[in-house]
Image (tube, grey):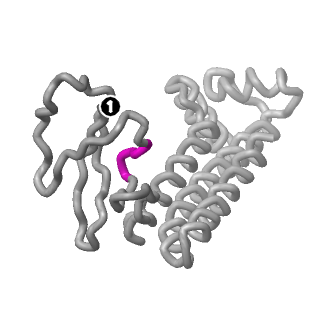
Amino acid sequence: MKYAEMQLDQTGIWLIRQVVEDWPADQPFDRPAADGCEWQQFPDDWPGRPGQIWDGQQLMPPPPPPPEVLNAQIIAAAEQRIDAIADEVYTRSVSRGARYRQKLGEARRYVAAGYPGTVAEAEYPYLVREAPVRGLTKRQLADAIIAAAAAYDDFGSLAETARAQLKKDVPAASDEAAKRAAADAIVAEVQAAAQALQQ
């Protein structure tokens, strides 16, 4: 047998809270119901599922959540997608991140010193070793490192701005479809910026 824990609302319809399937027919059903609910028995082929509505004759989809709940759900899901995009942009390696910070600091020192032509390897190890391997001058490599860091910083600000835009555009949209479309458009902008950065 199948049992459903049902909660009666003020309009006289039942909200299905949970369903227990394949209960032995020769055993009494003895599970306690939550406050304001009751267990009802149904045949095994009854297709009811938690969240659906039962009016005594037919099943209906669950009611839409309140606007503030829907907004929060859509925004949270979009923020997770933005975070996942950013995670692919920024290194997840602690050691690589430390090396990038060292390279950036070294490049900035080199630029601040006026791009000296002859430098000791111990003073600028990244520039001295890496520039010839890349076929660049130390000046070119230093400028490239600083430009790349600026681009990544700009992406970070774009991702944060997108999160703020979600909180503005999603609640302002007229219905669920428009809310989801607004969130998708914002995430797409972040995705496009990430792809451009990684090219």
Secondary element type, mark 1: loop
In percent of the image, x 23 and y 46: which residue is there?
Answer: 40
- Locate the N terminus and report the quarter of the image it occupies: top left
Q: Is residue 88 left or right of residue 4?
A: right
The one nearer the camera, 121 or 190, is: 190
Q: Is residue 120 left or right of residue 53?
A: right
In percent of the image, x 76 and y 24: which residue is there?
Answer: 130
Question: Which residue is under mark 1?
Answer: 21
Disc 1 residue type? Glu
Could you tell me residue 27's position as x and y percent?
Answer: 16, 24
Q: Which residues are magenta?
A: 47-51
- Locate the C terminus and report the quarter of the image it occupies: top right
Q: Is residue 117 visible?
A: yes
Could you tell me residue 162's position as x and y percent?
Answer: 57, 62
Which quadrant of the structure image shows residue 125? Answer: top right
- Residue reaching furthest to the right: 135
For residue 151: magenta? no
Q: Residues within 10 Å of mark 1 (few under 14, many from 20)?
A: some
Which quadrant of the structure image shows residue 8? Answer: bottom left
The one nearer the camera, 175 or 86, is: 175
Q: Main secondary structure of the magenta part?
A: loop
Q: Is residue 105 above or below residue 124?
A: below
Q: Is residue 112 visible?
A: no
Could you tell me residue 43's position as x and y percent?
Answer: 35, 38
Q: Is residue 191 above or below residue 12?
A: above
Could you tell me residue 135's position as x and y percent?
Answer: 89, 27
